[in-house]
Amino acid sequence: MTVNKLEPFTAQLTIDGTDVEVAGMSRGGSGLPLVFLHGFGSTKEDYADVIQREGLADHPILAYDAPGCGATVCSKLDAISVPFLVAVSLEVLRFKGIDRFHLVGHSMGGLTALLLADQEPSRVVSFVDIEGNVTPEDCFLSRQIISHAHPDPEDFFKDFQDRVWKSRYFSSSLYAASLPHKVRASAVRPIFESMVELSDHGNLMDRFLALPFPRMYMYGVQNNTLSYLDILAEKGVELAEISHSGHFPMYSNAPEMWSRLEEFVVRSERA
């Protein structure tokens, strides 16, 4: 039976002594689940249009707000790191009873998804990484915690929003305008510092290339100068360049993003 709507849910979790009330959305279905992890400054609703894709109509769906973002409540914002986000994802998967799944992650969510896939490769059917961090050059946003350091979290966050708002890249102003409504300022530093540390020292490229299932790396045309794209293609990663887009294809060119994602998921199940 096809389910054409998403239902909200909450999950009460405790991760390493930190209480988290996860706000999520999901639907049932007969196929393999699709698990979506959003990026920094975004929310689960980035992926709500999955219900418009007829080719994915039978797939169960799971998406949720990461701690520090959206409607999810976290008792210790300074405890948040990418490994913490991975631990949360494993607990949400357990809560929803999901074993094997297709994995989609954007930016911070792509990095979280990469570590999750590296830790649990037998559970992942395919992985769509939408501009997730795989090398140090990917920290063009998160490295500002160092390059534009400020002792006050609120002031740093306001200045960060202003810099992003003025960017020439697609959808940057739209993204920046929503940031104060989607992220707690005190969560920014621990998240960004963790992303930089992993990008610089986490051996992410080797871990990505070693994953034993179909992988797609999706990026906006404005970022087609990333130095590692040829390496990914040579190693069997499918590349998906999204036109009229930068770091946020779900805002700039959602139809093309969803079309490429759907095609890849369907093909990966036929492989």
Image (cartoon, helix red, strand yellow):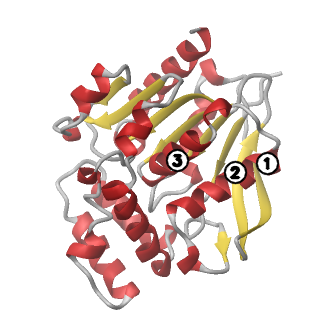
Relative to 205, 129 lies left or right: right
Q: Are marks 3 and 2 in contact (CB under 8 Å)?
A: no
Crowding around mark 1 (Cα neighbors within 10 Å: few <14, some 14 to 19, many 20+) is: few
User: In what quadrant of the picture does the C terminus appear?
Assistant: top right
Which residue is drawn at the image coordinates 59% and 29% (left, top)? 52
Residue 61 lies in quadrant: top right
Name the residue tied to disc 3. 115
Can you tell which mark lies on residue 232?
none
Of circles 3 and 1, the one toward us is 3
First in sequence: mark 3 vs mark 1: 1
Q: Residue placed at 38% from the left, 70% from the top?
A: 193
Q: Is residue 136 above or below residue 2?
A: below
> Which residue is under mark 1?
94
Q: Position of residue 131 (x, y in %)?
A: 36, 43
Of residue 46 and residue 201, the one placed in the foreground of this image is 201
Q: Are marks 2 and 1 in contact (CB under 8 Å)?
A: yes
Q: Which residue is mark 2?
A: 90
